[in-house]
């Protein structure tokens, strides 16, 4: 339950910390509801992990390269319609991804059409169809529940009511699987020893849940494994990912909200609620009062900002979380001749089975999609990496970065022709880069692992223990990705409007 920090003073001024997709979505929707919204963003540009940078005529997406929620009724479609701004142009990804298992030249193509995907998986994983049918059934029930707008995890009587009214008999059928993992389901269907299937699932699940099949909560995993198929599906934005945050900023301004870039919130104080803000453009620090705060930051950052104002139990829970992961990303600007013919926009490549295997998630720009001049392309290849070694002094930072870059390029050589003649731009980002440019604690990205103790009903709530401080972003339910954080933002706006509107 939340601690009441003050009486029911009228809420007019809302401060949003961070202009990532979660913060901007919440800010624009709240501004539309008539609140006076001010967004403070420490970077030069909005967008956070879904922003971009430019080098020598190439535009690189820093983190997110593909989006869910762009189909009819999808979360971005709904929110852009509500805000009255055009949905950014996009192309459906079909296949969403081509997955190369070690030593194989024929990829597993994750097709958009459900029947085509069924045929593909039956071809690659004979005998596994009952498992997929079971997952599909769980997904259908969970998705119907999600579409009735439950509030998870509930922390307030209104939240409980929203969760209860979203329940149906078919939701109750999913409850026995609340504590299961995808690995449990594999074992249940006698597929635990199917190395190819298990590896494929590990690769795909890590993209959405940060952890592999043995740890991913089954109810979350069933959804993550279904998002690439119609009527949902994955899209590739025209221009760059930046267009998403730019449109949200337009909506925010249309409703008289304000965005201040290069202004970092350093502390929050209570009674009255206020924020200490450092303006790096003018090198000034000042205090600003607010009636309510929406923090679009990771949970570790929130714990640091609020310090002793948070109850000890909450602080302990944050401190005891399994360490989230960081990311290493290589960005290449290349001649288009370096890419394979008819390459899909996304590849996932694993070089070996077992603990030595390294997987890369690769995004290739499409001709005319706005990321590279005609005849050129961008390649973005990311992998998960523990954050700790990047902040330790064991191996010099630049040495480690060069080792990772060389390894990634060597791995990409199996699919792309990369040499001095074809590669024009080469950049890399590490957990230190993400910590610096997105201010995320230790460069942890993508959210908390969706293990059973951290997903859905057990996740961190958008309500913090302080009644007037809310949390949005990829550390709360339903988790990571631009679509996930938009659902979270929509929930927070409903909570605020219900309680303070
Ligand atoms: C390599 C990589 C690949 C990814 N691929 C995909 C993908 O293909 N598709 C997808 O949907 N998702 C992908 N993701 C995940 C996705 O990018 C994130 O889950 C999502 O963008 C997070 O949005 P957010 O609003 O929660 O947080 P963020 O994007 O982190 O935004 C938080 C903002 O707050 C600002 N901020 C932080 N602290 C302060 C402070 N004290 N004061 C002021 N401002 C502050 C930051 O500068 C930042 O702009 C990827 C992530 C990474 C790193």
Image (spheres, helix red, strand yellow):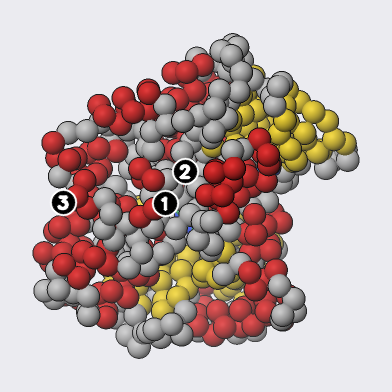
Toward the right, the furthest residue is 283
> Where on the picture, by quarter, is residue 107?
bottom left
Q: Residue at x 19, y 40 (%)?
A: 171
* Of marks 3 and 2, the one in the foreground: 2
In this rendering, does residue 113 appear at all?
yes
Q: Nearer the viewer, residue 258 or 421?
A: 258
Which residue is the site of mark 3? 137
Which residue is the site of mark 2? 460
Q: Secondary structure at mark 1?
A: helix
Q: Nearer the viewer, residue 282 or 222?
A: 222
Toward the bottom, the furthest residue is 103
How many numbered circles are shown?
3
Q: Residues within 10 Å of mark 3 (few under 14, many from 20)?
A: some
In this rendering, does residue 122 appear at all?
no
Mark 3 or mark 1: whose residue is earlier in sequence = 3
User: Mark 2: is the Cβ under 8 angstroms from ligand 1?
Assistant: no
Residue 342: percent from left, percent from top: 37, 71
CB atoms of marks 1 and 2 within 8 Å: yes
In three-dimensional space, the C-alpha distance between marks 1 and 2, rounded to whole angstroms, equals: 7 Å
Q: Secondary structure at mark 2?
A: loop
Q: Secondary structure at mark 3?
A: helix
Q: Is residue 203 above or below residue 223?
A: below
Which residue is the site of mark 1? 454
Residue 192: percent from left, percent from top: 22, 75
Lateral position of residue 133 relative to residue 449, left or right: left
Instruction: Identify the mark at residue 99; answer none if there is no mark.
Output: none
CB atoms of marks 3 and 1 within 8 Å: no
Residue 405: percent from left, percent from top: 62, 78
Q: Residue at x 83, y 30 (%)?
A: 286
């Amino acid at each position: 339950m939340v601690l009441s920090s003050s009486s029911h003073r009228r809420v007019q001024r809302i401060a949003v910390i961070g202009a990532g997709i979660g913060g901007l979505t919440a800010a624009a929707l709240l501004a539309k509801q008539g609140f006076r919204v001010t967004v403070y963003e420490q970077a030069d540009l909005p967008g956070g992990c879904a922003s971009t940078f430019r080098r020598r005529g190439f535009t690189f997406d820093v983190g997110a390269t593909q989006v869910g929620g762009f189909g009819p009724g999808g979360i971005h479609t709904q929110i852009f319609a509500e805000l009255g701004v055009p949905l950014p142009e996009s192309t459906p990804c079909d296949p969403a991804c081509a997955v190369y298992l070690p030593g194989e030249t024929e990829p597993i193509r994750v097709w958009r059409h459900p029947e085509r995907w069924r045929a593909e998986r039956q071809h690659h994983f004979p005998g596994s169809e009952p498992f997929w049918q079971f997952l599909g059934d769980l997904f259908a029930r969970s998705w119907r529940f999600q579409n009735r707008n439950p509030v998870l995890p509930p922390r307030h009587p209104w939240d409980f009511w929203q969760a209860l009214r979203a329940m149906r008999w078919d939701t109750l059928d999913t409850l026995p699987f609340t504590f299961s993992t995808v690995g449990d389901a594999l074992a249940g269907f006698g597929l635990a020893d199917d190395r190819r299937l298990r590896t494929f699932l590990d690769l795909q699940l890590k993209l959405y849940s940060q952890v592999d099949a043995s740890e991913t909560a089954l109810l979350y995993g069933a959804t993550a494994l279904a998002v690439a198929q119609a009527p949902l599906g994955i899209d590739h934005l025209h221009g760059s990912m930046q267009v998403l945050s730019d449109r949200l900023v337009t909506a925010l301004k249309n409703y008289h909200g304000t965005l201040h870039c290069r202004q970092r919130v350093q502390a929050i104080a209570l009674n009255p609620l206020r924020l200490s803000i450092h303006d790096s453009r003018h090198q000034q620090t000042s205090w600003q009062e607010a009636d309510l705060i929406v923090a679009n930051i990771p949970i570790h950052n929130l714990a640091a900002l609020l310090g002793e104002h948070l109850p000890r139990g909450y602080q302990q829970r944050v401190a005891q979380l399994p360490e989230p992961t960081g990311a290493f990303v290589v960005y290449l600007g290349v001649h288009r001749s370096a890419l394979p013919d008819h390459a899909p926009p996304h590849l996932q490549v694993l070089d070996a089975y077992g603990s030595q295997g390294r997987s890369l998630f690769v995004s290739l720009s499409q001709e005319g999609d706005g990321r590279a001049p005609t005849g050129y392309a961008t390649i973005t290849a990311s992998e998960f990496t523990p954050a700790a070694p990047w902040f330790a002094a064991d191996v010099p930072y630049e040495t480690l970065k060069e080792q990772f870059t060389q390894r990634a390029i060597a791995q990409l050589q199996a699919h792309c022709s990369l040499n001095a003649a074809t590669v024009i731009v080469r950049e890399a980002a590490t957990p230190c880069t993400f910590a610096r440019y997105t201010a995320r604690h230790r460069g942890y990205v993508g959210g908390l692992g969706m293990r059973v103790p951290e997903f859905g009903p057990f996740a961190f709530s958008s309500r913090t223990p302080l009644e007037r401080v809310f949390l949005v972003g990829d550390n709360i339910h339903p988790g990571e990705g631009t679509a996930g954080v938009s659902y979270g933002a929509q929930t927070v706006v409903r909570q605020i409007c219900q309680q303070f509107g």
